[in-house]
Amino acid sequence: MDKIRIVGGQALTGIIPISGAKNAALPLMIAGLLSEETLVLENVPRLADVALLQRILGNHGVDITTHGKRNGDDPHAGQTLEIDARVIVDTTAPYDLVSRMRASFWVIAPLIARMGVAKVSLPGGCAIGTRPVDFHLDALRALGAEIEIDAGYVLAKAPKGLRGGRIVFPKVSVGATHTALMAASLADGETIIENAAREPEIVDVADCLVKMGARISGAGSSTIHILGVPRLKGARHAVLPDRIETGTYAMATAMVGGDVMLSGARADLLDNALDILRQAGVEIDATNEGIRVRRNGAGILPVEVSTAPYPGFPTDLQAQLMALMTRARGRSRITETIFENRFMHVQELARFGARIHLDGDTATIEGRERLTGAPVMATDLRASVSLVIAGLAAEGETMVQRVYHLDRGFERLEEKLSRCGAVIERISA
Ligand SMILES: CC(=O)N[C@H]1[C@@H](OP(=O)(O)OP(=O)(O)OC[C@H]2O[C@@H](n3ccc(=O)[nH]c3=O)[C@H](O)[C@@H]2O)O[C@H](CO)[C@@H](O)[C@@H]1O
Ligand SMILES: C=C(OP(=O)(O)O)C(=O)O
């Protein structure tokens, strides 16, 4: 298994290109299943999750052509995927694939909407919480699907097709909103989704569906209206920039100091997180090129933050902010409201000498100037990058194990950071 070795203490200076968003690319690829015509997606990041979803879609019979060479004219340009789902040979998504990535469960929506039947393995829990799929299933039932659960699989049927309906989510769910949007796009009649997720990735998927001929209004607000159409056509769409990758490198720069341009980043996608960084004493400037992040000399100020659905502070940046606060001048408080168990990084951050006290859903962090490098273990995607951020600031050597978690969501992480002066390398097993 690969490891990442870091020798901390270097400031970051230079340009970090921001990749396409994983959490938009995955549902966009799944949306390709909705049409018999080709969906062309540009700016798709080269990530393990994208490669796994290619395999899962391939299992359904989808043909995916990839363009864009890593060493081509623009080494930072994402890849382009041509997704051809003309023929669907299999409506089953098996356990061994779905259990490896939660978002793969979302294939249930296009499969039942287009084929009238789907058999998809339950995704199961993971290191950040139990993560049930009841909202997804209730949304599909509201559109007329019959659902049974048998031997770990969800069996969904709608032999006469889905029909429009009213879906009221009891709690904001990104994935269930994707499911509802995709299913309703091909249902007969009007669907209203209430308490919909407002994340930019929902808007990106809705924009793509509209290019494919879907009739959707209100994406980005809590109420989305969809008028179903009998079929969707092909389209071309570029994945929006990754706001979580953007926030992660902004926090890395804040952690070690320096001056970094996050090129291609869009400040409007993470206003809340950028405001928190400003409160922490970091200089942030949105420009035409991207977002410039600077911290020179001044220390990091403590903050109080609760995670919340968009436009609140994202849970996917909670671990990274906690790493940053381990060096703040004083006491910070971070409350996690989305997932019940997203604190696996706390015990690993302690290995650097960080002082964090956990009480229920709230972590209190007593900042200290000096961290020391340590061997640490990645437990999930964002937790693992928080360890990289701590390692960049720690004195001496840090070795991050289980790097496959990082490869799920950060494209060329060690290359992007080392080009800005970090001492970081991958040690291949
Ligand atoms: C691939 C992707 O885009 N993943 C993101 C997506 O995950 P995901 O879509 O899985 O997360 P949700 O927004 O659905 O989860 C929000 C909350 O709702 C609960 N819930 C969700 C569905 C359900 O049927 N029942 C239920 O109780 C979850 O356990 C959680 O407590 O949004 C999360 C919250 O912003 C992010 O952390 C993930 O990075
Ligand atoms: C939790 C995440 O992803 P997933 O929902 O795929 O587990 C994430 O992107 O931080």
Image: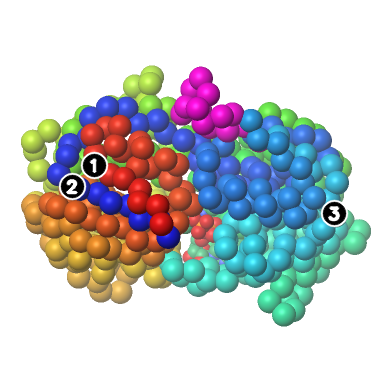
Front-most of residues 199 and 116: 116
**Left or right: where does residue 193 sit relative to residue 382?**
right
Give the residue type at disc 2.
Gly
Provide the residue span drawn in magenta: 68-81
Q: Residue at x 70, y 45 (%)?
A: 31
The answer, for residue 196, to whether it is visible in the render is: no
Q: Is residue 75 magenta?
A: yes
Q: Quadrant of the N terminus?
A: bottom left
Give the residue type at disc 3.
Val
Closer to the chain start, of discs 3 and 1, is: 3
Closer to the chain start, of discs 3 and 2, is: 2
Front-most of residues 205 and 23: 23
Secondary structure at numbered mark 3: loop
Q: Residue at x 25, y 49 (%)?
A: 6
Q: CB of mark 1 within 8 Å of CB of mark 2?
A: yes
> Measured along the vertical axis of the image, is residue 275 above or below residue 52?
above
The residue labelled by disc 1 is 423
Q: CB of mark 3 within 8 Å of CB of mark 1?
A: no
Q: Position of residue 358 (x, y in %)?
A: 24, 71
Q: Residue at x 15, y 44 (%)?
A: 9
Chief SS of the magenta region: loop
Front-most of residues 425 and 74: 425
Q: Quadrant of residue 68?
A: top right
* Cα distance between the residues tagged 3 and 1: 48 Å
The residue labelled by disc 3 is 89
**Left or right: where does residue 335 sit relative to residue 236?**
left
Give the residue type at disc 1.
Val
